[in-house]
Image (spheres, rainbow, N blue to C red):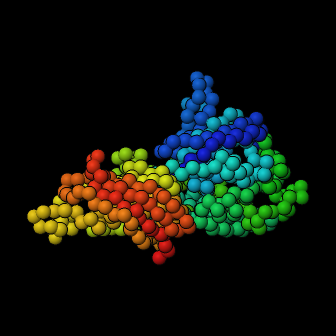
């Protein structure tokens, strides 16, 4: 599975009050470059402070009360989980959050839906690079009394949550969702924050929930919803717990491939569990970090393409403009298996394999736009106007430049040119289509 780096296409701003502080707050979501991650920019005593949304910047568990707080250089940012969940749920990996007031403005709807609408208004831009991701290879568990969080291997990113409240209007609830943008927007983002009436007074005595109201939070009072409120989902409370957990897991700094199970958890356990995952980053499915984070390395290519030895014929993608063009590299060495017979004593790369490598480069362009590449293949369906202008021999580095000419549904047409240095060695028009296997 491959995750692409995505940012916002423009800026969008919201104003209001903080959920816990009750103070005026202003937040702008803005585009960020590749490999930036999600970062907060806030005013500090000596100028702007940049605070990455990473778990190492989260307050320790004993200091977290009903929200997740980031801190560094003498400043604190409260209640970051909902906006982080909205970004992660929609697949945004790079974003600058400019914040005034120390806390994101609480949405009038009391859920992450307003943040989702902000992101939709700004638009999402595919940045043409794969994102590092965290793959759960073996189970990991965090437990404190009855509270438990577990990470298990899975082909997707899924969260399952179990809650059990004494208030009969909540009771026992459990839900499980695969985290995908469309499903997140419909099924998770609208779920509102909630509290028990007995907790509200206590929180306000602690200086918290000062911006909360019946308009932006569900309040349960002795088996009933206060103020004539109605539920959006019968299990809205556990869905909001999934929303909170997704926001806290976003502090890992990368998408997750795996199944996260939680029982009776809150922000403090969520953050401690995320710390546990962060300590195990070395178990990501990479033997090494990308040497050049502006390129696709071979691991990212193999995450996208099904080809393997001896038929994976590209080594690196050095440029990709989603929906437009791609540039790939093939290093040709004497160890290529086809040189044994083509030709003994006079090694020349077969012209048909030059075209195959060109087509594989174009396949990366097509499959990079697919949300889930598993079970998807690019079928090579036609070649027009192929020309071969000079032999390719061991020691050459092939550079394939392909431009998307036309696309209609799963069918596409691309113009490809193969270069060695500044010399054109081959060209062709290729027809392909993406199919389900």
Q: Nearer the viewer, residue 233 or 369?
A: 369
Q: Nearer the viewer, residue 289 or 274?
A: 289
Q: Where is residue 91 in the image (x, y as percent from the top left)?
A: 57, 55
Image quadrant in which you'd find residue 24: top right
Image quadrant in which you'd find residue 344: bottom left
Q: Does residue 54 appear left or right of residue 345 in this picture?
A: right
The residue located at (81%, 55%) in the rendering is: 219
The residue located at (28%, 55%) in the rendering is: 425
Q: Position of residue 258 (x, y in %)?
A: 51, 64
350 over 92 or under it: above or below: below
Residue furthest to the left in view is: 345
Q: Does residue 100 appear left or right of residue 180 in this picture?
A: right
Residue furthest to the top in view is: 46
Residue furthest to the right in view is: 228
Q: Position of residue 9 (x, y in %)?
A: 60, 46
The residue located at (72%, 54%) in the rendering is: 113
The residue located at (12%, 63%) in the rendering is: 346
Q: Which of 54 and 294 is in front in this view?
A: 294
Image quadrant in which you'd find residue 313: bottom left
Residue furthest to the front in view is: 385
Q: Is residue 98 visible?
A: yes
Q: Is residue 277 visible?
A: no
In this rendering, the count of numbered labels is 0
Q: Position of residue 389 (x, y in %)?
A: 26, 57
């Amino acid at each position: 599975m491959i995750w692409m780096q995505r940012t916002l296409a423009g800026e969008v701003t919201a104003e209001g009050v903080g959920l816990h502080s009750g103070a005026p707050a202003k937040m702008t979501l803005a585009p960020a470059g590749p490999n930036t991650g999600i970062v907060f920019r806030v005013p500090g005593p000596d100028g702007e402070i940049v605070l990455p949304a990473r778990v190492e910047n989260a307050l320790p568990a004993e200091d977290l009360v009903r929200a997740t707080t980031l801190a560094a250089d003498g400043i604190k940012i409260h209640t970051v989980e909902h906006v982080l969940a909205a970004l992660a749920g929609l697949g945004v990996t790079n974003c600058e959050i400019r914040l005034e007031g120390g806390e994101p403005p609480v949405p009038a709807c009391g859920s992450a839906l307003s943040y989702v609408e902000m992101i939709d208004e700004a638009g999402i831009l595919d940045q043409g690079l794969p994102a590092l991701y965290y793959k759960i290879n073996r189970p990991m568990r965090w437990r404190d009394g009855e509270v438990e969080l577990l990470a298990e291997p899975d082909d997707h990113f899924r969260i399952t949550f179990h809650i059990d409240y004494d208030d009969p209007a909540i009771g026992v609830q459990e839900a499980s969702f695969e985290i995908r943008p469309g499903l997140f927007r419909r099924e998770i983002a609208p779920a509102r924050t909630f509290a028990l009436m007995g907790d509200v007074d206590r929180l306000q005595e602690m200086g918290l929930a000062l911006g909360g109201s019946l308009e932006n939070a569900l309040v349960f009072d002795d088996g009933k919803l206060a103020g004539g409120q109605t539920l959006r989902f019968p299990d809205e409370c556990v869905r909001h717990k999934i929303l909170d957990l997704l926001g806290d897991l976003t502090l890992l700094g990368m998408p997750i491939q795996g199944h996260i199970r939680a029982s009776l958890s809150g922000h403090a356990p969520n953050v401690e569990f995320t710390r546990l995952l962060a300590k195990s980053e070395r178990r990501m499915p990479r033997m090494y970090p990308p040497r050049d984070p502006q390129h696709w390395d071979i691991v990212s290519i193999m995450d996208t393409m099904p080809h393997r030895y001896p038929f994976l014929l590209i080594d690196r993608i050095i440029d990709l403009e989603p929906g437009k063009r791609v540039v790939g590299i093939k290093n040709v060495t004497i160890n290529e298996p086809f040189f044994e017979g083509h030709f003994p004593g006079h090694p020349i790369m077969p012209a048909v394999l030059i075209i195959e490598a060109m087509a594989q480069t174009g396949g990366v362009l097509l499959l990079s736009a697919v949300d889930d590449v598993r079970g998807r293949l690019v079928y090579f369906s036609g070649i027009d106007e192929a020309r071969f202008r000079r032999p390719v021999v061991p020691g050459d580095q092939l550079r394939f430049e392909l431009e998307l000419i036309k696309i209609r549904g799963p069918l596409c047409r691309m113009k490809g040119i193969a270069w060695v240095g500044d010399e054109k060695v081959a060209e062709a028009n290729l027809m392909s289509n993406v199919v389900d296997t």
